[in-house]
Image (cartoon, grey):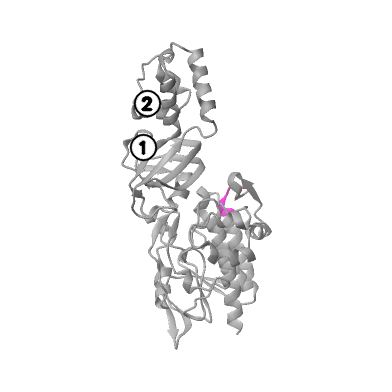
Amino acid sequence: MMAALFAAEMGAKVCLIERNVRPGRKLAITGKGRCNVTNASDLREFLTHVTSDPRFLYSCLSAFDTAAVMQYVEELGVPLKVERGMRVFPVSDRALDVVDAFADALRRSGVQTVCDRACALKICDGRLQGVICEAGEYPCDACIVATGGKSYPLTGSTGDGYALAKCAGHTVTPLRPSLVPMVSPDPFCRECMGLSLRNVGVRLYLGDKELYSDFGEMLFTHFGLSGPCILSASTRMSESGNYRVVIDLKPALSDAQLDARILREIQENPKRELRGLMRTLLPGKMLDPFIARAKFDPCKRSAEISRQDRETMIASLRSLSIPISGLRPIEEAIVTAGGVSTREINPKTMQSKLLPGLFFAGEVMDVSAETGGYNLQIAFSTGRAAGIAAAEMSYS
């Protein structure tokens, strides 16, 4: 939609081929239905959250940065707000407001939207001539492939763009799920199923090497771990490896502060059993699994807890280790990692280096980032760059 809008703004005659009844179906479910439009961090900070080829994105993100996207969306009539972590949402908390605003803008700009599914590119004498769809053929001077990846296939992103890219001889790097929940064999996860933790520290390790650390929210599920911190950590994982997640349940307190708190609880209630003491430190659903994991005696009196016991308690609260056996399927991922190789795409125009007239935008390329609005910003910035360049080419 962004590519079509900017191409039309440049004066090009634009046809938007959409396999769904209406465009923006995936946009409507982003941010848990609230639409995390972008992330309001500056460019340098933004690029640290891009997990695949940040240098490729530097030019298009500089030309159409987060502030520009926010201004653009607000000018379409959707007021925005900035929340924790610089995440940007509509004031209404309704993703459909963003989708409707784009749809209205497309109508005003004269973009022709047709409901069809692209199957192949028509290439003659080394030049793009059109797009072949299920219902017919569409001649064109330029074509932008902005089909998304393979995640959330019910929204229409079933990987069609990769086949179109291969028509032109493009390399498609191996696809894998990203921003996706993690699978763990640890029964602790099932015992705590449904428990959401806020303000915890999360570190991802491969063997003894720390790959990622974050602070925020996570969730225990029947299959393993989920939640914003876990989804972002998943971007640092390959399909297999000796991974583990280490959770700090009390990151806001130093060891000395945590010890002082435990001592105060002991002094105020010396006859209370250890299980009662731990209830002041942990959510109820985690209490028994945690005590069993740490091999504490739940009936031990508070007055009997030694300094060594307190040190063990603090260490257990600081480093709850969960082994990770893999990731959930790509169909459950928010983003597809891998895609059309960026080595074969011009980073300023998004034009193919192999086939004149062919452009790419968004997730179909091998570009991805953490959760927090970064991936939508990438889609908007690459879409704008492709739309402008494609329109200019149609005049040449």
Name the residue rendered at 60%, 68% in the picture: 5
Inspect this view and state whether residue 228 appears: no
Give the side of residue 180 with respect to residue 89, left or right.
left
Query: With respect to residue 114, does 235 lie above or below?
Result: above
Given the image, on which type of amino acid does mark 2 rest?
Ile
Please give the residue where the numbered disc 2 appears in the rendered image: 291
Give residue 122's quadrant in the image. bottom left
Please give the residue where the numbered disc 1 appears in the rendered image: 189
Q: Which residues are magenta?
A: 92-97
Measured from the top left, where is residue 158 in percent x and y? 40, 63
Q: CA distance from mark 1 to mark 2?
A: 14 Å
Quadrant (top left, top right, bottom left, bottom right) of the C terminus: bottom right
Name the residue rendered at 33%, 53% in the picture: 240
Measured from the top left, where is residue 92 in percent x and y? 61, 47
Quadrant (top left, top right, bottom left, bottom right) of the N terminus: bottom right
Crowd around label 1: few <14 · some 14–19 · many ≥20 (10 Å)? many
Name the residue rendered at 49%, 21% in the picture: 262
Upstream in sequence: badge 1 or badge 2: 1
Given the image, on which type of amino acid does mark 1 rest?
Cys
Name the residue rendered at 47%, 71% in the picture: 343
Give the side of residue 364 with respect to residue 62, left or right.
left
**Residue 39: mark:** none
Query: With respect to residue 256, does 346 lie above or below?
Result: below
Tell whether label 2 touches label 1 (CB within 8 Å). no
Measured from the top left, where is residue 113 in percent x and y? 53, 70
Please identify, in this view, whether the residue under mark 1 or under mark 2 is nearer the observer.
Answer: 2
Measured from the top left, where is residue 157 in percent x and y? 43, 62
Q: Which of the pair 163/19 is nearer the observer?
A: 163
